[in-house]
Image (cartoon, rainbow, N blue to C red):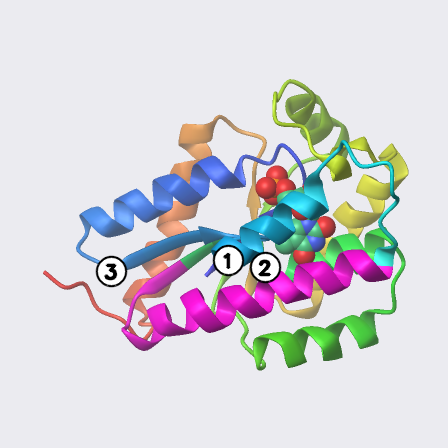
């Protein structure tokens, strides 16, 4: 299962809460994030998000680094966890690449999909929660965060394209990508999210059962 959304959408907080409540229900849960999740992938994340480099990162280099990190993550962390029957909760995954590098940067989506399929071995989430927030609201929330990264410095139009991109992706795959309204308070968003996830689990969308 993956959590997606623009800057300031609160998905990281919600990912943590979801992993805690699923763990409390007895599920084997792995909470992880992208770019990152392994030592090498976290090093690539540092290169991708650092703000102190004078060398510009070409969009193609950016996507190659993201996919290199994803390959490590899928091979060393995600697939082994799925194999043992765990629920994997990943904070961002392939949809971020399509939204940011495809819709945001303007790279060819067909090429990105092929490269992504190659990098992941065609691994796709069972469920994706898209935390939806108007762009301006997200940037306001994000603006108060202390850990600003390289992509936070993009112009507003970039985020508008990313936001529209996420919606286009959700429209293309409405069963997999479910939009969650991220405007209410975190507790209300958590309740919405949990109702949705628990309902999917009851319909045994995932091939996993609680251990106790
Ligand atoms: P986050 O930890 O706040 O989600 O930040 C990660 C940043 O990396 C965010 O600005 C989006 C960006 N990103 C991409 O541009 N493409 C990707 O495929 C992924 C996973 C992240």
Residue contact between numbered discs 2 and 1, judged by CB atoms under 8 Å:
yes
Ligand 1 has an atom within 8 Å of the beta carbon of the residue at disc 1 = no
Please give the name of the residue rendered at 41% of the width and 38% of the height, measured from the top-left corner: 190
- Could you tell me how far apart the alpha carbons at marks 3 and 2 are, in whole angstroms? 20 Å
Please give the name of the residue rendered at 54% of the width and 76% of the height, measured from the top-left corner: 123
First reached walking from the N terminus: tag 2 or tag 1: 1
Residue holding disc 3: 28
Ligand 1 has an atom within 8 Å of the beta carbon of the residue at disc 2 = yes
Q: Indicate whether residue 122 is drawn in magenta.
A: no
Please give the name of the residue rendered at 43% of the width and 46% of the height, measured from the top-left corner: 193
Residue numbers of the magenta segment: 60-88
Number of marks: 3
Residue holding disc 2: 93
Residue 205 seen by the camera: no
First reached walking from the N terminus: tag 3 or tag 1: 1
Q: Position of residue 151 (x, y in %)?
A: 76, 39
Q: In the figure, is residue 211 to the left or right of 132?
A: left
> The residue tagged with tag 2: helix, strand or loop?
loop
Nearest the eye: 199 or 132: 132
Nearest the eye: 166 or 81: 81
Residue holding disc 1: 2
Residue contact between numbered discs 3 and 1, judged by CB atoms under 8 Å:
no
């Amino acid at each position: 299962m993956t959590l997606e959304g623009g800057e300031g959408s609160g998905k990281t907080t919600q990912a943590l809460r979801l992993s805690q409540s699923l763990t409390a229900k007895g599920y084997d849960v792995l909470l992880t994030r992208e770019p990152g999740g392994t030592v090498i992938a976290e090093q690539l994340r540092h290169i991708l998000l650092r703000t102190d480099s004078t060398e510009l990162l070409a969009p193609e280099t950016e996507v190659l680094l993201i996919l290199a990190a994803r390959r490590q993550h899928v091979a060393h962390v995600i697939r082994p966890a799925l194999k043992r029957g765990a629920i994997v909760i990943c904070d961002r995954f392939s949809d971020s690449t399509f939204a940011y590098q495809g819709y945001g940067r303007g790279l060819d989506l067909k090429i990105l999909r092929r490269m992504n399929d190659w990098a992941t071995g065609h691994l796709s989430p069972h469920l994706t929660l898209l935390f939806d927030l108007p762009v301006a609201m997200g940037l306001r929330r994000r603006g108060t965060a202390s850990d600003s990264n390289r992509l936070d410095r993009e112009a507003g139009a970039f985020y508008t394209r990313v936001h529209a991109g996420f919606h286009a992706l959700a429209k293309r795959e409405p069963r997999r990508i479910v939009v969650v309204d991220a405007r209410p308070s975190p507790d209300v968003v958590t309740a919405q999210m949990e109702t949705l996830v628990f309902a999917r689990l009851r319909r045994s969308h995932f091939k996993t059962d609680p251990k106790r």
